[in-house]
Image (cartoon, rainbow, N blue to C red):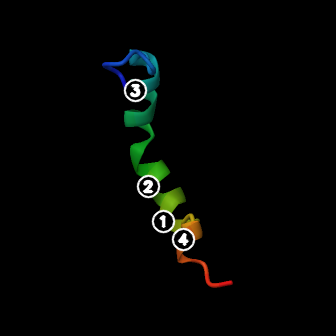
Amino acid sequence: MVVSGKLDKHCVNALRYHQEYLKQVIDTHPEIDPKDRIN
């Protein structure tokens, strides 16, 4: 995304800085894939 100009270096640096915290949030609140739902 950086190469295509969708994220600037400040966004990338912020994501890198908070990477461990973001991993914890994702592990705590996993997103359910809609195709895996049983109706």
Of the two numbered discs 4 and 2 in the rendering, the one whose residue sits closer to the viewer: 4
Contact flag, marks 3 and 4 (Cβ < 8 Å)? no
Q: Which residue is mark 1?
A: 27
Distance of mark 1 from mark 2, alpha carbons? 6 Å
Q: Which residue is mark 2?
A: 23
Q: Give the side of residue 6 with respect to residue 25, left or right.
A: left
Of the two numbered discs 1 and 4 in the rendering, the one whose residue sits closer to the viewer: 4
Distance of mark 3 from mark 4, alpha carbons? 30 Å
Q: Residue 25, percent across and down?
A: 54, 57
Contact flag, marks 1 and 2 (Cβ < 8 Å)? yes
Distance of mark 3 from mark 1, alpha carbons? 21 Å
Vertical side of 34 occupied by 1: above or below: above
Distance of mark 3 from mark 2, alpha carbons? 15 Å
Q: Which residue is mark 3?
A: 12
Tell me the element at label 3.
Answer: helix
Q: Which mark is residue 19?
A: none
Q: Residues within 10 Å of mark 1 (few under 14, many from 20)?
A: few
* Location of the C terminus (image quadrant): bottom right
> Which residue lies at the image location 36% right of the left edge and 18% below the top edge?
4
Q: Which residue is mark 4?
A: 35
